[in-house]
């Protein structure tokens, strides 16, 4: 009997019970080059094609090299399971954290977040989720998700659930296709040194993203997608990544994307790859490569576990130097990024696509819970700023900045929480400064610099403000993005290059003369309005000071 007929009968028999009809249909397939990829029916409405390699495995001699284009596909492939995530940076907490609900980055003890698919150096795969009505002539808009994890942890399925987005897009009558990827992380993706610059192999994680975007151009049409309608979407390091995709190549985006959504991440003011030299040298020493004629060649030949152990010995986000001093942030390398990203913005090296850039109110709280417990006095605080975020700034500059972030508890972050949440005497102050330094000031800089030049929107989440200690923490807007209002805005943007639509409140563009910002309000007991339009001018003096400082002294 024809499987569809059989399933129709069975579904009648099963009436409204669990197993849906789709379960009995033949699995979906797609033809790429001369190959057949078999996916799964991930719901009644969607197909998934998972774990498809988009570049040659970056193993053996391809470790620490630019991603290499995948050969034409031939044969039959099973695309029914996610591929392993890229190797993680397993980092220790400076001390055990005993607070509940610290947000997505808060992992226990020495372990990294984990994936059901495990981790491997051979990790460069993409995943596609599409409406199951899509055919090669559908030309549906595409959202290209870049996960967050500080450039050190995470993977395609870490903090974005594409199934939710595709289902919602179908329900809205504006179907989109979801693409997610794994890209290299930490020492595998962001090792930095003069050797790295000379070899042109900096920012490999960003290069991986670019290669995956080229893969989308070649192949998404076969899934029913429109390669001219790709919206980048990222959270945290994924958002910073999306912004760097806008800045690279002199701002020429090669038609790879037409819009961007960047949640909690904007062009981070980073220094050159040479800033990572001490960490590079440390890894070289730990792997016995110090006397090698070519240390980079030597690192390529180091057995996997030794390379990983040398990486894991370097400080993580939770060490004293915290997020500001993370060893594996991107740097400008002369290849992917030819200057401090903020200088590139000023030079106009920016892809001219409409974009959304957003923040959470309390971006710095989660990253500050563990590092600053020996920072209790004004002098400690100023030393901390110098040690961690502004190593090259002189003491009077640091003192001026410190004065803009006073020690009085109600001024700190979680903002607008009075005397609550003061974990340590300087905690709320450090959280305010770290959040603004790494997230809010770079966003404001980016948006101000492009005001009047590019179409843009911005929003701020004050939801879940009552979360103890961390308030509206970094990534606390994930529920808005995956099943909340932001979902609809993103689907509208991907479809019409404008986030506005029937299902959501109006969202005016952020303009030079009116820097409108959509605020997702914390709603006590669900009463009252859930959003309002405000102006993106809060903490103006602090932001101006930080923007000036960061141009001069990148983190
Ligand atoms: C597909 O196979 C045919 C016949 O073997 C060959 O001529 C063609 O080049 C192949 N196409 C690709 C994209 O590999
Ligand atoms: C892949 O296929 C294209 C034709 O679709 C052909 O031009 C190209 O040479 C092939 N590449 C390789 C590496 O076989
Ligand atoms: C792919 O699968 C089909 C159907 O199962 C089979 O006929 C064909 O020989 C397979 N091709 C290869 C290259 O294995
Ligand atoms: C964290 O790790 C400690 C020690 O392994 C364990 O006792 C504790 O239950 C863990 N906490 C959580 C929230 O997993
Ligand atoms: C806090 O401890 C770190 C080491 O964990 C040290 O480097 C730093 O100097 C200390 N800060 C202060 C203000 O004592
Ligand atoms: C700057 O401040 C640090 C402590 O934060 C202190 O150790 C250092 O001596 C000061 N430098 C000057 C030039 O005053
Ligand atoms: C909330 O805190 C901000 C500091 O970011 C301040 O500018 C604002 O006035 C406060 N709002 C209220 C209602 O207290």
Image (spheres, rainbow, N blue to C red):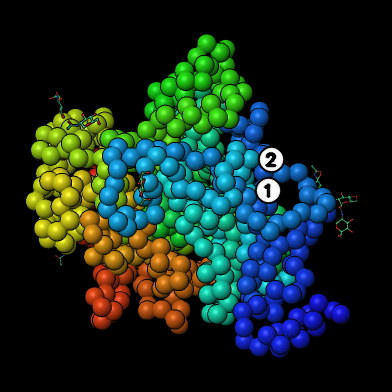
The tag on residue 338 is none
| Badge 1 element | strand
Give above or below for 151 relative to 15.
above
Q: Is residue 65 left or right of residue 497?
A: right
Give above or below for 344 relative to 232.
above
Q: Badge 2, how many Cα within 10 Å: few under 14, some, many 20+? A: some
Give above or below for 154 relative to 514.
above
Residue drawn at x 57%, y 70% is 166
Q: In which quarter of the image is residue 499?
A: bottom left
Q: Position of residue 553 (x, y in %)?
A: 29, 35
Residue under pointer 1: 53
Q: Quadrant of the N terminus?
A: bottom right
Which residue is at the front of the view, 485 or 273?
485
How far apart, in angstroms, are the residues tagged by discs 2 and 1?
7 Å
Residues tagged 2 and 1 counted as in contact (Cβ below 8 A): yes
Which residue is at the front of the view, 231 or 310?
310
Q: Quadrant of the C terminus?
A: top left
Q: Where is residue 163 in the image (x, y as percent from the top left)?
A: 56, 67
Ligand 6 shown in quarter: top left
Which residue is at the front of the view, 499 or 359?
359
| Badge 2 element | loop
Residue drawn at x 73%, y 71% is 135
Residue under pointer 2: 56
Q: Quadrant of residue 347?
A: top left
Q: Say how many tags the image has.
A: 2
Q: Badge 1, how many Cα within 10 Å: few under 14, some, many 20+? A: many
Residue drawn at x 53%, y 43% is 206
Q: Position of residue 69 (x, y in %)?
A: 69, 42
Residue drawn at x 44%, y 44% is 112
Q: Is residue 542 left or right of residue 258?
A: left
Tell me if residue 166 can be seen: yes
């Amino acid at each position: 009997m024809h499987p569809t007929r059989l399933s129709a009968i069975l579904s009648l028999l099963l009436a409204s019970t669990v197993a849906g009809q789709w379960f009995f249909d033949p699995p979906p397939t797609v033809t790429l080059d001369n190959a057949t990829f078999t996916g799964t029916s991930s719901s009644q409405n969607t197909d998934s094609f998972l774990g498809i390699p988009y570049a040659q495995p970056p193993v053996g001699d391809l470790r620490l090299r630019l991603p290499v284009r995948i050969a034409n596909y031939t044969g039959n492939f099973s695309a029914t399971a996610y591929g392993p995530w890229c190797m993680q940076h397993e980092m220790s907490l400076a001390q055990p954290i005993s607070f509940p609900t610290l947000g997505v980055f808060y992992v226990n003890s020495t372990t990294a977040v984990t994936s059901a698919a495990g981790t491997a150096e051979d990790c460069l795969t993409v995943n596609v989720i599409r409406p199951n009505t899509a055919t090669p002539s559908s030309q549906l808009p595409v959202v290209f998700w870049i996960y967050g994890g500080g450039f050190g942890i995470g993977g395609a399925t870490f903090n974005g659930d594409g199934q939710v987005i595709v289902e919602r897009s179908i329900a809205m009558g504006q179907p989109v296709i979801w693409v997610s990827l794994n890209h290299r992380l930490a020492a595998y993706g962001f090792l930095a040194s003069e050797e790295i610059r000379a070899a042109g192999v900096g920012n490999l994680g960003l290069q991986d993203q670019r290669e995956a975007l080229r893969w989308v151009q070649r192949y998404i049409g076969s899934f029913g997608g429109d390669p001219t309608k790709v919206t980048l979407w990222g959270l945290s390091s994924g958002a910073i990544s999306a912004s760097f995709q806008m800045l690279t190549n002199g701002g020429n985006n090669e038609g790879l994307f037409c819009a961007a959504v960047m949640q909690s991440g904007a062009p981070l003011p980073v220094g050159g790859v040479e800033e990572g030299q001490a960490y590079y040298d440390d890894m070289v020493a730990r792997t016995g490569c110090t006397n090698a004629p070519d240390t980079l060649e030597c690192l390529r030949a180091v057995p996997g576990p030794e390379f990983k152990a040398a990486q894991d010995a370097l400080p993580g986000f939770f060490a004293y130097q915290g997020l500001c001093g993370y060893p594996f942030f991107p740097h400008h390398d002369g290849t992917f990024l030819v200057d401090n990203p903020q200088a590139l913005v000023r030079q106009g090296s920016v892809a001219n696509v409409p974009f959304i850039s957003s923040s959470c109110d309390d971006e710095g709280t989660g990253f500050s819970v563990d590092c600053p417990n020996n920072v209790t006095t004004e002098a400690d605080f100023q030393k901390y700023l110098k040690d961690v975020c502004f190593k090259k700034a002189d003491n009077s500059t640091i003192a001026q900045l410190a004065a803009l972030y006073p020690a009085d508890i109600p001024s700190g972050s979680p903002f607008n929480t009075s005397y609550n949440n003061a974990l340590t005497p300087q905690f709320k102050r450090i959280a305010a400064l770290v959040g603004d330094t790494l997230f809010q000031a770079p966003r404001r800089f980016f948006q101000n610099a492009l005001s009047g030049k590019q179409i843009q929107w911005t929003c701020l989440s004050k939801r879940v403000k009552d979360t103890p200690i961390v308030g509206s923490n970094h990534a606390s807007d994930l529920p808005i993005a995956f099943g909340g209002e932001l979902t609809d805005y993103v689907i509208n943007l991907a479809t019409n290059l404008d986030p506005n639509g029937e299902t959501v409140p109006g969202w005016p563009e952020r303009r030079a003369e009116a820097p409108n910002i959509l605020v997702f309000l914390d709603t006590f007991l669900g009463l009252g309005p859930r959003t309002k339009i405000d102006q993106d001018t809060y903490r103006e003096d602090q932001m101006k000071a930080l923007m000036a400082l960061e141009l001069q002294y990148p983190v």
